[in-house]
Image (cartoon, helix red, strand yellow):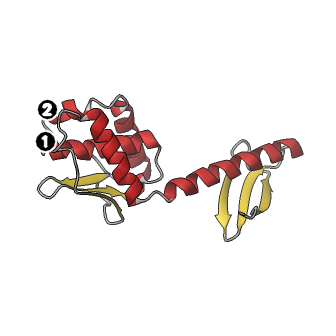
Amino acid sequence: MTRKPVIEVRRSKRRRRTVSAYRDGERVVVLIPAQFSRAEEREWVDRMLERLAAREQRARRTDVELTARAQRLAARYLPDHPLAARPASVRWVQNQNGRWGSCTPGDGTIRISHRVQEMPDWVIDYVLLHELSHLVIASHSSAFWALVGRYPKCERARGYLEGVSAAAGLGITE
């Protein structure tokens, strides 16, 4: 049985519309505008607890899950390359600060930056498919981009990653 966390609501007169929450040890702190009614407070506390739980669940993604996800993507989007698109290993790494993912076609290894772990599933899928496509075509040629382009949310995911990179000042490009 999981215990319900202690919730501390902090009201701010300077805060107008935004609501945020974070975990402080065993306690969850929810920051809300001072003018919110008690009903709005309850609604937003529940909503923020759900968001916090979802964020924490995404952060617990494992290498095993990532490998299974890569296998599903390869089967769906690269069915005409069954051997080439079968990675030897797929794992999350902490040491990639200049790229979202990397692939070594020679040994079939794929590494995905921990920065991607908390991103939406469709962005993770794009990064994985990008790296899987490198197992088929090592360069960023037009044939490579044709493989990556099989993913329906390709352009949307690329835009998302560019936005995250620009907003955080990371300078990460493909």
**Residue lying furthest bottom:** 25
Above or below, 168 against 155 in this view is below
Q: Secondary structure at mark 2?
A: helix
Q: What separation in Å lies between label 1 and label 2 (alpha carbons)?
A: 8 Å
Of 14 and 84, the residue lying toward us = 84
Name which residue type carries label 1: Ile
Can you give x and y, in whole percent of width and height, for residue 13 in the image? 80, 51
Can you give x and y, in whole percent of width and height, for residue 105 in the image? 14, 52
> Is the residue marked by circle 2 packed among few (<14), some (14-19), or many (20+) residues within 10 Å?
few
The quarter of the displayed image where residue 8 is located = bottom right
Q: Which residue is mark 2?
A: 143
Can you give x and y, in whole percent of width and height, for residue 118 in the image? 48, 52
Can you give x and y, in whole percent of width and height, for residue 19 in the image? 70, 48
Q: Secondary structure at mark 1?
A: loop
Left or right, residue 62 beside residue 18:
left
Of 48 and 167, the residue lying toward us = 48
Q: Which residue is mark 1?
A: 137
CB contact under 8 Å: marks 1 and 2: yes
Left or right, residue 29 beside residue 92:
right
